[in-house]
Amino acid sequence: MRELLPLAERIAATLKARKQTIAVAESSAGGLISAALLAVPGASAYFIGGGVVYTRQAILALRDTRESMFEGLRGATEPWALLMARTLRSRCSADWGVGESGAAGPTGNRYGDPPGHAWVAVTGVVERAVSVNTGSNDRVANMYAFAKAALQLLAETLEK
């Protein structure tokens, strides 16, 4: 996880300076996004909460979440990652939200996406999302790649 720390430290410094907060909803990154942000000393100043919402069942357990919110959507897509970021941001009353959904591997997901495919999203005063395609079936490497992409997108968004 040490390779994620420089990005997390940049993000932490910006959020602390602005007195802003973040919430994270991740799935195939398995908690690495949150772990990197929490590894920075003083994380309680900006990190409200996060969750590994790996299944629809986990998402539906969130307060005020219902099946109709997901109608016509599927995981590992831009709209899904944005919805996850918006939902956790709203539930936590955070300034910023991060969402991630993908297929870590070694096989693809049930929707037909290949391993190494994910979408990461950031929501706040602006919204941005990017796709990640590693071309690899290495589960652990993909999890780190997804976390790095999410942190990179967040850092870039905060710096604009």
Image (tube, rainbow, N blue to C red):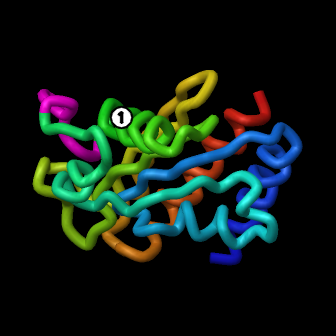
Graded by Cα atoms within 10 Å as few (under 14), some (14 to 19) or many (20 or more), the crowding at tag 1 reads many
Image-quadrant location for residue 91 = top left
Q: Is residue 88 above or below residue 53?
A: above
Residue 132 placement (x, y as % from top left):
44, 47
Front-most of 62 and 38?
A: 62
Residue 152 placement (x, y as % from top left):
65, 48
Front-most of 32 and 43?
A: 43
Q: Disc 1 on helix, strand or loop? A: helix
For the N terminus, give its image quadrant: bottom right
Q: Residue at x 39, y 38 (%)?
A: 87
Q: Amino acid at mark 1?
A: Leu
Q: Residue at x 24, y 45 (%)?
A: 75
Magenta span: predominant SS is loop
Q: Is residue 5 above or below residue 53?
A: below
Q: Which residues are magenta?
A: 68-76
Image-quadrant location for residue 44 = bottom right
Residue 92 placement (x, y as % from top left):
51, 45
The total of numbered circles placed on residues is 1
**Magenta segment: does it hold 67?**
no
- Left or right position of 16 against 2: right
**Magenta segment: does it hold 69?**
yes
Front-most of 110 and 138?
A: 110
> Residue 145: in sight, yes or no?
yes
For the C terminus, give its image quadrant: top right
> Residue 142: in sight, yes or no?
no
Q: Residue at x 54, y 26 (%)?
A: 127
Residue 14 placement (x, y as % from top left):
82, 44
Q: Is residue 36 above or below residue 81?
A: below
* Residue to which mark 1 is pinned: 83
Query: Residue pushed farthest front?
Result: 63
- Left or right position of 58 against 50: left
